[in-house]
């Protein structure tokens, strides 16, 4: 293996210990950070992610308020619940696990969350703050991906970064964060002809399309930093990313594994955003 592994679990441990210290300091001042975690329906993967989020809160001294609803919960009832949590001073962050059942409009739900508690960074206002370079909450997956890139110790400034994927939750905010760090950014997507033409020029590749083996060894510049955001299930039930890990690790300089890369960092950055929200509330 030529590439160095970027270990998301190890970086998460380090950042979560900092979160725990900040949570303890807030709690000592009578402001224990609180995160409301809402799960609607029975999606098994969502149940695992939510359980891990609640556990991460417990381990870090963040109070979690976990609310689980049946899949037939009405949109109005969910919006009313968010309204109540917006008004609760002990709740600093509100997280509604995605995806939601089809009859609930995710945009309405996201926009119902107070911007000061939007620790997922999904709302239009949070996206606007990111776009404008203001201090809003950054979506957890791209935020965690930036931390993983920074952990290599390589300067991002002036590097060519190629993002594969243009979703509102990962691809677009990732491109903005890289731009803010002074990278030259190319955004590619499912409609991009000859993806390899772009990725072969990249010093940093972030793959976030949700399709296994999208990035193969022949598409990677030797020594590049490769961040794999994908979460795909193989036929044998095992998890894999969007990157052909076995092939690409022989060419790249740094690479994140799946599992153990971006996934744990998504939860870690949720904690970081929650602490930030609690610190801002305590300062008001
Ligand atoms: N409200 C939100 N919904 C969703 C988000 C989000 O950030 N906010 N992101 C994804 C799911 N997600 C967090 O919710 C998430 C996905 C994966 C992991 C993770 O730790 N993955 C592990 C593997 C876990 C496994 O074995 O299945 C890893 O990569 O090591 C954490 C969080 C969609 N919804």
Image (tube, rainbow, N blue to C red):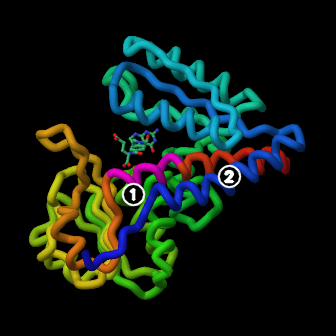
**Per the image, is 236 magenta?**
no
Measuring from the top left, give residue 125's x and y in whole percent: 56, 49
Name the one closer to the observer, 115 or 228. 228
In the rendered view, does 174 fall on the left or right side of 15?
left
Q: Identify the residue at image location x=33%, y=56%.
A: 229
Please tell me which residue is depicted at 58% across the width and 67% down the height of the picture: 133
Residue at (32%, 59%) from the top-left corner?
257
In this view, 42 is above or below 134:
above
Magenta-highlighted stretch: main secondary structure?
helix
| Quarter where residue 37 is shown | top right
Q: Is residue 120 left or right of residue 116?
A: left
Residue behind label 1 places its C-beta within 8 angstroms of ligand 1: yes
Q: Is residue 114 visible?
A: no
Magenta residues (range)? 259-267
Kindly identify which residue carries mark 2. 19
Residue 151, position as x, y percentages in the image: 50, 72
Q: Quadrant of the N terminus?
A: bottom left
Q: Tag 2's secondary structure?
A: helix
Determine the secondary structure under disc 1: loop
Residue 155: give x, y in percent of width and height.
48, 84
Circle 1 residues within 10 Å: few <14, some 14–19, many ≥20: many
Q: CA distance from mark 1 to mark 2?
A: 19 Å
- Relative vertical location of residue 233 with respect to residue 76 in this rendering, above or below: below
Quadrant in which residue 228 is drawn:
bottom left
Residue 9 visible in the picture: yes
**Pointer 1 residue:** 261
């Amino acid at each position: 293996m030529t590439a160095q592994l970027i270990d998301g679990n190890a970086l998460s441990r380090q950042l979560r210990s900092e979160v725990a210290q900040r949570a303890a300091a807030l709690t000592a001042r009578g402001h224990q950070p609180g995160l409301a975690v809402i799960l609607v329906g029975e999606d098994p993967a969502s149940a695992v992610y939510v359980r891990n989020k609640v556990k991460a809160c417990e381990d870090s001294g963040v109070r979690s308020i976990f609310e689980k609803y049946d899949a037939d919960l009405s949109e109005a009832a969910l919006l009313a619940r968010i309204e109540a949590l917006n008004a609760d001073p002990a709740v600093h962050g509100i997280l509604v696990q995605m995806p939601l059942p089809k009859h609930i409009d995710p945009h309405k739900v996201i926009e119902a969350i107070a911007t000061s508690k939007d620790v997922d960074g999904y709302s239009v206002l949070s996206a606007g703050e990111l776009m404008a370079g203001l201090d809003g909450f950054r979506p957890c997956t791209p935020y965690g991906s930036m931390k993983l890139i920074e952990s290599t110790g390589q300067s991002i400034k002036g590097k060519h970064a190629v993002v594969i994927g243009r979703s509102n939750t990962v691809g677009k905010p990732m491109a903005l964060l890289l731009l803010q760090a002074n990278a030259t950014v190319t955004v590619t997507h499912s409609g991009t002809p000859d993806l390899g033409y772009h990725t072969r020029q990249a010093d940093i590749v972030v793959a976030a399309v949700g399709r296994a083996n999208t990035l193969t060894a022949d598409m990677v510049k030797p020594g590049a930093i490769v961040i794999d955001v994908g979460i795909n299930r193989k036929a044998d039930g095992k998890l894999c990313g969007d990157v052909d890990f076995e092939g690409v690790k022989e060419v790249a300089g740094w690479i994140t594994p799946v599992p153990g890369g971006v996934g744990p960092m998504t939860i870690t950055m949720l904690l970081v955003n929650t602490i930030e929200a609690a610190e801002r509330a305590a300062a008001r």
